[in-house]
Amino acid sequence: MDAPAVIGELRDIHEKAEDPDVGAMPADDEVYRALLYTETHAAALKITSDDVRRSAAIKRVMLWEYLREQAEIHQVKAIEAARGANAEWTQLAPALAVSGKSGAYQKAKRLKAVTLTDESLNGRTLRRTPEAVLAAESRIAARDAEQQRAQKTAQRRHDALMPVAHHLIEHRAGLPDSGNVTYWLDEVAAVLPHCETPTQIVSLRTYVAAVVRELRKVELQEPRPIATTDSARLAYAAAAELFPS
């Protein structure tokens, strides 16, 4: 939600209603103070139509809801900071206006629902119960762990791919100088010196796989080994191991 923009819309409404005090209305980015102004000066809109007053009131409702959600997000951060400083739930209970550690824990979990993004809900709001929050946290943790495993696997593949690609280019003179082989080796050579971004890494993997594919085609047509040097043979063998047929 663009809260300052909505404040700007309320300002326009008050200006058109010729609110005599609108010049004192706080700036658009001072959402809380500006919203208080529109509340205390709502009577300035009495000369407008029901539609205008209704629109202004609904905008105020939207903004208070926005501020409430923002307050809860910041309260969650404060709770996490307190817990990080070894605060007990019993110590947090008075601050959360509840009795006992169980009440503090459950309220903290309910507040946490505002900050969680659970893709499995498909845009639906997470229920504000400790059980729903715990289940969502478990799903999110599992998803994050899977992403980390995938990233580590991709990094291992990249780490294995780089030396193989370097050896192919270093010893390409000992490999067949045929059209497709040469083309894909040139592609490898072009991306290899600055292979850092995910797109470049994917491209390098695609190009090395294409080199292996074309070399295998040449092998099927040649009665003799296609690599003319031991270094080229080893470079090809290492690449072929990365991309088994």
Image (cartoon, rainbow, N blue to C red):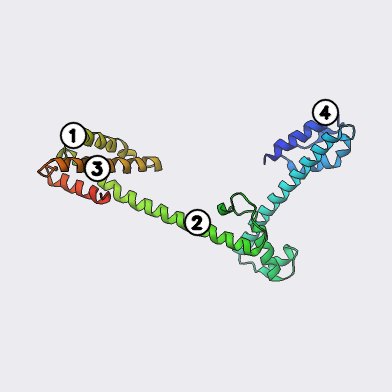
Residue drawn at x 22%, y 44% as measured from the top left: 167
Q: Nearer the viewer, mark 4 or mark 3?
A: 3
Q: Is residue 127 left or right of residue 43?
A: left
Q: Decide: marks 2, 4 in contact (CB < 8 A)?
A: no
Residue that mark 1 sits on = 178
The furthest residue to the left: 224
Q: For the residues carrying marks 3 and 2, which lies nearer the camera in this image? A: 3
Question: Callout 4, which amino acid?
Answer: Lys
The x, y position of residue 230, in whole percent, is 13, 47
Residue 213: mark in rendering: 3
Tell me the CA gap for discs 3 and 2: 35 Å
Residue that carries the numbered disc 4 in the rendered image: 16
Q: From what the image shows, is residue 180 above or below residue 219? A: above
Report how far apart the C-alphas of labels 2 and 1 lie in the structure. 46 Å
Foreground pick, 42 / 182:
182
Q: Residue at x 70, y 52 (%)?
A: 71
Report how far apart the C-alphas of labels 3 and 1 lie in the structure.
13 Å
Q: Nearer the viewer, residue 11 or 210?
A: 210
Total marks drawn? Answer: 4
Are the residues tagged 1 and 4 within 8 Å (C-beta)? no
Few, some or many C-alpha atoms within 10 Å of disc 4 (few <14, some 14-19, many ≥20)? few
Frontmost residue, 78 versus 169: 169
Q: What amino acid does circle 3 point to? A: Arg
The secondary element bearing badge 3 is classed as helix
**Tag in front: 2 or 4:** 2
Residue 218, quarter of the rendered image? top left
Could you tell me if the residues under marks 4 and 3 are in contact, i.e. CB atoms within 8 Å? no
Residue 85: percent from left, percent from top: 61, 64
Relative side of 111 to 15, left or right: left
Q: Earlier in the sequence, mark 4 or mark 3?
A: 4
> Can residue 136 be seen in this snapshot?
yes
